[in-house]
Image: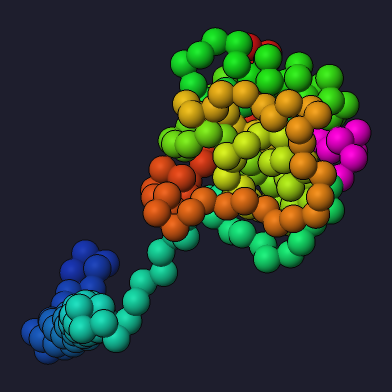
């Protein structure tokens, strides 16, 4: 009967009683887990710090290279503007019926473009746009075309005395005439020189910022 009354000291009311050695073992395992987590955090912090230092060093090297001129940053190129370009070629006078011309008035004189366009129409030019514009050009008139319209521009210049030729990037053979403050009148039809010749470009002493840069002309504009 006495042996039956003996109880297991590790069991209390059906539950296991944690002994001292078991408790110490559990604490040691937990401590090992915390140590592993600390090591991982320290490793991560070290990697981030190394990357940050590398970025700072790269930024300093890049800045020094730009300052010393060893590295140049790309910059946006401005759009090309019409320039004074005078071909050396000789041109024949072109029949006016094959010349497409747009007439623009850059002066404060009302109706100037319309009256000049009517005169060109009477001479059988094919007139397109007729409009008022703002332009920095100073002179009699600017005659503008692409390379394909140089022969037509030559013919137009024979009707506009004192005009300056400018070339732009258009690909068709159209010609623009920009009438400026010094414009007086077209050459009388019977006095137009129809012999071969060269385009008339701005003289060297007139190639200023005002004559070398012309406005972007409208594709279509109301009649003044």
| Residue 157: quadrant of the picture | top right
Q: Name the foreground residue: 64 vs 208.
A: 208
Residue 112 location, x and y as percent? 60, 16
Q: Is residue 143 above or below residue 61?
A: above
Q: Name the foreground residue: 23 vs 137.
A: 137
Q: Residue at x 76, y 16 (%)?
A: 118
Q: Is residue 210 above or below residue 17?
A: above
Does the magenta segment cover residue 118? no
Q: Residue at x 68, y 66 (%)?
A: 88
Q: Left or right? Give the position of 185 relative to 36.
A: right
Is there any visible trace of residue 41 in the rendered image? Answer: no
Is there any visible trace of residue 132 in the rendered image? Answer: yes
Q: Residue at x 82, y 21 (%)?
A: 121
Residue 180 location, x and y as percent? 51, 29
Q: Left or right? Give the position of 14 relative to 116.
A: left
Q: Name the foreground residue: 17 vs 96.
A: 96
| Residue 183: quadrant of the picture | top right
On the rendered image, what quadrant is the C terminus found in?
top right
Give, as a single range, the part of the protein colored magenta. Answer: 94-101
Residue 38 location, x and y as percent? 16, 81
Residue 7 location, x and y as percent? 19, 78
């Amino acid at each position: 009967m006495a042996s039956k009354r003996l109880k297991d000291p590790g069991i209390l009311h059906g539950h296991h009683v944690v002994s001292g050695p078991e408790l110490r073992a559990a604490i040691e395992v937990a401590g090992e887990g915390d140590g592993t987590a600390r090591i991982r955090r320290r490793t991560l912090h070290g990697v981030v710090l190394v990357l940050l230092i590398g970025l700072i060093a790269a930024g300093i090297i890049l800045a020094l290279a730009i300052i010393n001129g060893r590295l140049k940053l790309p910059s946006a190129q401005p759009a090309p503007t019409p320039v004074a370009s005078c071909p050396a070629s000789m041109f024949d006078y072109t029949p006016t019926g094959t010349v497409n011309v747009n007439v623009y008035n850059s002066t404060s004189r009302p109706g100037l473009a319309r009256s000049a366009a009517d005169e060109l129409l009477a001479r059988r030019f094919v007139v397109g746009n007729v409009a008022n514009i703002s332009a920095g050009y100073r002179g009699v008139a600017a005659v503008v075309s692409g390379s394909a319209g140089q022969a037509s521009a030559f013919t137009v210049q024979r009707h506009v005395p004192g005009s300056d030729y400018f070339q732009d990037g258009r690909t068709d053979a159209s010609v623009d005439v920009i009438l400026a403050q010094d414009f007086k009148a077209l050459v009388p039809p019977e006095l137009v020189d129809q012999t071969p010749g060269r385009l008339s470009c701005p003289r060297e002493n007139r190639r200023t910022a005002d004559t070398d840069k012309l406005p972007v002309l409208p594709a279509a504009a109301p009649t003044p």
